[in-house]
Image (cartoon, rainbow, N blue to C red):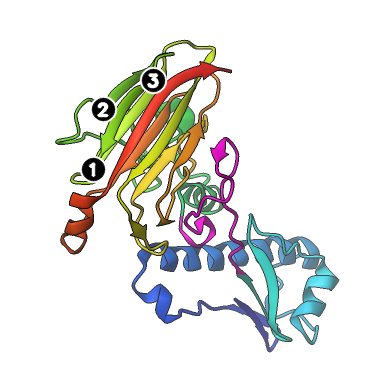
């Protein structure tokens, strides 16, 4: 939150019990605070011919925003006033629905988690001049050039290596690289190991269609680490669909000529019973675009 006091805007992070044990949510709170500070500083510098701090004479935070016309918009989140002297953001839950059935599939609250997209935004705000060469010419798979060491890249999930060219390795998962053809193929996912799969259509003009069928009953709390993730957009640095709650049957369709990445997690000891009793049958094939 941003609090206005004695001509200065002070930025605070309010942490609840739900956030203390979640690293991603703490990171997201820090991201919000830094992004809010950046936006406010940019606004005040442009409108006050200087840093603005200490020169603000308005009485309330709403007055500051109105006078200097500071944009309160912030990605997918919603802005709100906590009290007359403060201003903050809270997450707006927006599930993924494009190319997914059913549309009401229960999913993680993506807005409350720190994402690779957030990391890219912070880098563009604070480290834009650190590595002069364009990341896309040096790093692979939409990775980000590391501001700590410009010879290395920060990789999105599913990728690793100095330049993020390598796909994550799996153990005890069978073939990682799967090819979808017009005839349906099946793969059983048992959650006994961290597994990474890449599924490509045989034809460049075709789409990959995945159907997941639950074998057994399972409930996965939405505030736990992800059980399964499916990245189906062209940009694989963007978070995919992450089902949670009562795991049920669902389908995901990719885009024309685009591969789909699938991750399944190794269930910890406390979920060992679920690991032996629950599986997902993944049916995959290519379909017309």
Q: Tags 2 and 1 in contact by the CB under 8 Å rule?
A: no
Res 71 → quadrant? bottom right
Q: Is residue 172 left or right of residue 226?
A: left
Element on which disc 3 rests? loop
Asked if disc 1 and disc 3 are in contact, CB closer than 8 Å, the reply is: no
Do we see residue 53 in this rendering? yes
Q: Which residue is mark 2?
A: 176
Magenta residues, as a range? 90-114
Camera-nearest residue between 213 and 89: 213
Give the prevailing secondary structure in the magenta stretch. loop
- Whole-percent x and y of residue 227? 33, 51
Within 10 angstroms of label 2, few (less than 14), some, or many (20 or more) residues? Answer: some
Single out the residue that lies furthest toward the front.
216
The residue located at (42%, 12%) in the rendering is 202
Tell which tag, 1 or 3, sits nearer the viewer: 3
Quadrant location of the C terminus in the rendered image: top right
Residue designated by label 3: 184
The span from disc 1 to disc 3 (Cα, nearest Å) is 20 Å
């Amino acid at each position: 939150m941003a609090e206005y006091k004695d001509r200065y805007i002070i930025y605070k992070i309010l942490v609840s019990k739900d956030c203390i044990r979640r690293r991603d949510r703490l990171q997201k709170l820090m991201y919000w605070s830094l992004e809010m500070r950046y936006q406010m500083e940019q606004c005040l510098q442009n409108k006050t011919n200087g840093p603005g701090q200490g020169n603000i004479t308005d009485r309330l935070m709403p007055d500051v925003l109105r006078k200097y016309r500071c944009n309160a918009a912030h990605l997918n989140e919603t802005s709100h006033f906590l009290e007359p002297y403060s201003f903050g953001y809270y997450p707006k839950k927006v599930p993924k629905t494009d190319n997914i059935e059913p549309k009401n599939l229960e999913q993680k609250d993506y807005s409350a988690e720190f994402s690779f997209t957030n990391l890219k935004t912070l880098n563009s705000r604070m480290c834009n001049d650190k590595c002069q060469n364009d990341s896309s010419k040096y790093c692979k798979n939409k990775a980000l050039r590391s501001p700590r060491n410009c010879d290395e890249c920060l990789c999105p999930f599913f990728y690793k290596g100095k330049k993020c060219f390598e796909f994550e390795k799996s153990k005890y998962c069978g073939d990682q690289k799967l090819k979808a053809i017009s005839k349906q193929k099946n793969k059983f996912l048992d959650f006994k190991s961290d597994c990474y799969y890449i599924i490509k259509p045989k034809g460049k003009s075709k789409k990959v269609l995945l159907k997941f069928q639950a074998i057994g009953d399972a409930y996965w709390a939405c505030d736990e680490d992800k059980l399964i993730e499916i990245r189906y957009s062209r940009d694989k640095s963007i978070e995919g669909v992450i089902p949670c709650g009562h795991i049920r049957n669902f389908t995901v369709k990719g885009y024309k000529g685009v591969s789909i990445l699938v991750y399944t997690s190794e269930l910890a000891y406390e979920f060992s019973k679920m690991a032996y009793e629950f599986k997902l049958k993944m049916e995959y094939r290519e379909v017309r675009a």
